[in-house]
Amino acid sequence: MYWKDYYDDDQPIIYVAGPYNAPTEMGIMDNIRKACEARDDLVVAGWAVVCPHANTANMDNENPDIYYRMDVKILARCDAIYMLHGWENSPGARMEHEMALEWGITVYYESGGVPQRRASADGLSKFA
């Protein structure tokens, strides 16, 4: 097994953004589940996916600033962001959306469906 067999420099990276916190533990778990389902759909569509919900699942959420700092650092390296339903109600997702717009990161919304990675005539991947 060799890493070069798996590396695709043209594979775009997409960041999943949406609600994490909820009034109940079950609500938080449901938000994590939804984000992970979106992650799985995006992987099938050809994206390299960053899902912060999975990165921080079940971690102490007493100080969200720690996670926000980590998340914006990761988002800055992404080609696109995928906004889950309800993102407008999440302070963290609103911040990530604002950052994506300011940095010129392509924004997709769950309401528009899963964006497909496709090949252009020159063989390079493009956003669908």
Image (spheres, rainbow, N blue to C red):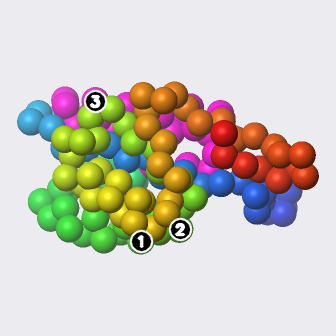
In the rendered image of this protein, does residue 86 appear above or below residue 63?
A: above
Task: Locate residue 20: give its quadrant.
Answer: top left
The answer for how far apart the CA atoms under marks 1 and 3 are is: 25 Å
Q: Are marks 1 and 2 in contact (CB under 8 Å)?
A: yes
Q: Name the residue that disc number 1 marks.
A: 73
Q: Looking at the picture, tell me which residue is in the foreground, 112 or 66.
A: 112
Question: At 47% across and 49% down in the image, what residue appears?
Answer: 107
The answer to whether 127 appears left or right of 22 in the picture is right
- Answer whether residue 24 is magenta in the image: no
What's the residue type where badge 1 is placed?
Lys
Which residue in the protein does label 3 denote?
30
Q: Calculate the distance from the C-alpha at mark 1 to the C-alpha at mark 2.
A: 7 Å
- Amino acid marked by disc 3: Asp
Q: Residue 15 placed where, x, y %?
A: 48, 52
* Residue 38 at least partly seen: yes
Residue lying at the far right of the rendered structure: 122
At 43% from the left and 37% from the top, the residue drawn is 109
How far, Cα to Cα, is label 2 from label 3?
A: 27 Å
Determine the image quadrant of residue 22.
top left
User: Label 3 crowding class (10 Å Cα cut-off): few <14, some 14-19, many 20+?
Assistant: some
Give the residue displayed 39% in from the left and 42% down from the top. Answer: 83
Q: Choose between 50 and 18: the one closer to the eye.
A: 18
* Residue 99: image location, x then y, percent: 36, 63
Highlighted range, magenta: 26-51
Amino acid found under the numbered disc labelled 2 = Arg
The N terminus - image quarter: bottom right
Say which residue label 2 marks.
77
